[in-house]
Amino acid sequence: MANPLARMRIAVAVSFLIAVVLFRASHAPAVAAEEWMVTDNPPGHGGGRIVVGLRSEPKTLNPVLATDATSRDVIRSSLRTSSISTARH
């Protein structure tokens, strides 16, 4: 019969191998999913008009003074669209 120290080493080695196998299995590379943000359409052109449907008119377009929800929504919407167009150039 093997001594207790040898049994402990074997148990630790087996536990380590099981942990490695489980870790690798849980972090396996995912299958590439379909990309929803890709289009075959040609890019748009600069300029134009953005139309936003609102319940009321914004009180201001100044981000420092915007206290109502409508003003904040319009400002957020314009900042998002400007950052998107800036990132493309």
Image (tube, rainbow, N blue to C red):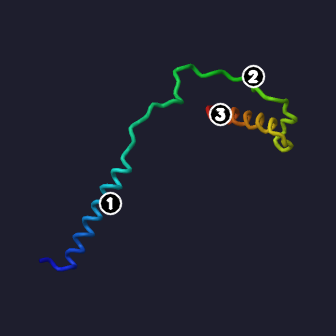
Q: How many marks?
A: 3
| Residue at the (84%, 44%) spot, across then down | 64
| Residue at the (76%, 36%) spot, across then down | 73
Where residue 9 appears, x then y in whole percent?
24, 73
Question: Are there few (<14), some (14-19), or many (20+) residues within 10 Å of tag 3?
Answer: few
Residue closest to the eye, 88 or 56? 56
| Label ID, residue 49 | 2
Q: Residue under circle 1?
A: 19
Indicate the secondary structure of the residue bearing disc 2: loop
Residue closest to the eye, 27 or 3? 3
Image-based side of 66 in relation to 1, left or right: right
- Residue mark closest to the camera, 1 vs 3: 1
In terms of sequence position, does the residue under pointer 1 or pointer 2 come before the other? 1
Image-based side of 22 in relation to 87, left or right: left
Indicate the secondary structure of the residue bearing disc 1: helix
| Residue at the (52%, 21%) spot, across then down | 40
Q: Residue under circle 3?
A: 84
In terms of sequence position, does the residue under pointer 1 or pointer 3 come before the other? 1
